[in-house]
């Protein structure tokens, strides 16, 4: 019940952003299970273009978009991993006119297991997924 009160206390623009982030994140997590990554990537790149007709609504900042993805992922099953979150963040950033690059990096776990992490960079800084990013060796940027 407390979450509902917190949600209703948000400004209407933030509620729209949070609902949009949750919807997009859930769809990406589902499609990741059904389609190859390459196919999903083509879809997200295509959808990431800003709308041809401006909505008249102000665009949220990159930090606010990262906030919305982070909050939405707490409540949606199957959305806790970095890849669906980074894909959703990149798509939302681009839809709202921000430059965004999906990055994937790899690291060795105790010298044996290979681990991967996804994050999003915008205008020379990591805007989403930065918590573990420094220990990963980035692969070439995905375009």
Image (cartoon, grey):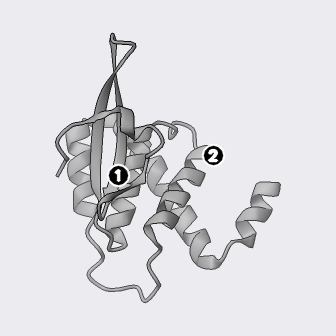
Residue at the outermost bottom position = 56
Q: Looking at the image, which residue is at 46% across and 84% down?
A: 58
Residue 114, placed above or below residue 86: above
In which quarter of the view is residue 121 placed? bottom left
Determine if residue 33 is in view: no
Q: Which mark is residue 64?
A: none
x and y, in percent, of residue 111 in the image: 33, 12
Figure disc tally:
2
For the N terminus, the quadrant is bottom right
- 3 shown above or below 17: above
Which residue is depicted at the point 48% across and 64% down?
Answer: 63
In the image, taking residue 100 as reference, residue 84 lies left or right, namely: right
Viewer-proximal residue among 136 and 16 = 136
Single out the residue that lies furthest toward the right. 1
Q: How dense is the environment of label 1, judged by Cα within 10 Å: few (below 14), some, or many (20 and up)? A: many
The earlier-in-sequence mark between 1 and 2 is 2
Q: Position of residue 142 (x, y in %)?
A: 19, 47
Closer to the observer: label 1 or label 2?
A: 1
Closer to us: 75 or 90:
90
Residue under label 2: 75
Location of mark 1 (residue) = 120
């Amino acid at each position: 019940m407390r979450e509902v009160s917190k949600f209703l206390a948000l400004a209407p623009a933030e509620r729209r952003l949070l609902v949009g982030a949750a919807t997009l994140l859930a769809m990406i997590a589902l499609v990741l299970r059904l389609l190859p990554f390459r196919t999903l990537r083509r879809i997200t790149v295509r959808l990431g273009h800003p709308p041809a007709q401006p909505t008249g609504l102000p665009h949220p900042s990159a930090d606010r978009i990262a906030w919305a993805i982070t909050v939405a992922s707490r409540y949606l099953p199957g959305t806790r991993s970095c890849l669906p979150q980074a894909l959703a963040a990149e798509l939302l950033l681009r839809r709202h006119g921000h430059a965004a690059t999906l990055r994937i990096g790899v690291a060795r776990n105790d010298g044996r297991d290979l681990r991967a992490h996804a994050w999003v960079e915008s205008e020379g800084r990591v805007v989403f997924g930065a918590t573990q990013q420094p220990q990963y060796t980035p692969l070439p940027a995905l375009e």
